[in-house]
Each structure stands twice: as structure tokens, then as C-alpha cells.
Amino acid sequence: MQELRNLSAWSEGHAWCSPERHGAMTGVFKSQIDWLPLEVGSIRPTQGRTLAVMQVSGGSQSFNAVNQLRVLGRWMRMVTIPNQSSVAKAFEEFDDAGRMKPSSYYDRLVDVMEELYKFTLLVRDRSEYLTDRYSERNAEQEKQRAALAAKAMSHERK
């Protein structure tokens, strides 16, 4: 899990792909995401990073897992790209070497990854500006005012 955290901190964007099982992302995948901290001190490690969401399923096409992944990304303050991919009957889409066969699913997956790359370039060096929040600035100013007032009154306590 430490390696996952380190790679997440190093990255500019994430590409998440979960199997859909019983109409939802798998518990194992959710558990991995839960190990990524929302806050470390005053830093939000995933805030402002780009995110692509994808899913594979053994049956007919569905979008339950990608919808859940999208909600997780939003909760983690990530910039989730508009495009997504859902590969139905995934067991039919790969060759014996484990490579994805040419298909509309393959094309869509490439589209998603290209879009992730483009959004990452757009967000790069602008993430701090895009995720700057009035409420957080206001809370920080309030702390600074309180500290300044305490310092100004410190001579009264002696």
C-alpha cells in the first residue's frame, strides 16, 4: 500500500479500471482506493489530479462501476475526464498473449487515455488555481487572525 501511496503522490493523473461484480466495483478495488489518503496534514494528495475511469465486465455492458468510480474521484477532489470506457464480455476481448484485440472497445479505450493525457496537460501547473477554495482561504485567514490577536495580547498574560 505504501508503494500505491507513493505512486499516487508522484502522479499527475490516475487511470482506474475495475471489474464490475454484482453490479458494482469490486471490494478489492474499493479497498485499494480507500488506502489513498484524503488529507495528509493540510495537503490533499489527490486534489486536482486528473482521473480516467474504466470498467470491464463478464456479461452485458453496464456503467455501474464507472459511475461509482466517478463519485469516488469527485469525493477525492480529482478532475475526472468526461469520457469513460466500459468493456462488456471482457473475456472475449483479449488474445492469448493478454493483449486487447482490435475492436470498438479498444478504440474507445485509446480515446479515454488520449483524453486523460490532454486533460492532464491542461490541468498541469493550474491545479492549485483550479482547486483554490474560498472556504479554505477564509478558514486559513481566520487562523492567522486568531494567532495575530493571541500574539498581540500575549503581553497581557505576564
Image: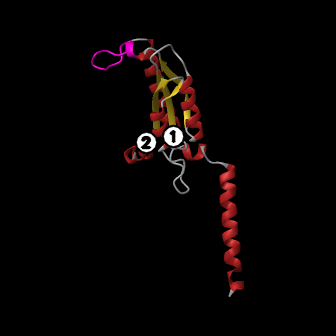
Is 100 contained in the magenta span?
yes
In this view of the protein, which residue sits in the foreground, 36 or 79? Answer: 36
Furthest-bottom residue in view?
Answer: 158
Instruction: Name the quarter where the N terminus is drawn.
Output: top left
x, y percentage for residue 97? 27, 19
Residue under label 2? 11
The magenta-colored residue range is 91-102
Task: Please give left or right for residue 140 compared with residue 11 in the image.
Answer: right
In this view of the protein, which residue sits in the foreground, 45 or 31? Answer: 31
Q: Vertical placement of 102 versus 76: above or below?
A: above
The amino acid at mark 1 is Arg
The number of discs equals: 2
Q: How is the image coloured?
A: secondary structure
The numbered disc on residue 49 is 1
The amino acid at mark 2 is Ser
x, y percentage for residue 69? 54, 31
x, y percentage for residue 123? 53, 38
Task: Please give left or right for residue 100 compared with residue 105 in the image.
Answer: left
Element under label 1?
A: loop
Residue 72 figure quarter: top right
x, y percentage for residue 66? 53, 26
In this view of the protein, which residue sits in the foreground, 33 or 107? Answer: 33
Q: Disc 1 and disc 2: Cα gap in Å?
A: 8 Å
Q: Residue at x 39, y 48 (%)?
A: 2
| Marks 1 and 2 close (CB-CB < 8 Å) | yes
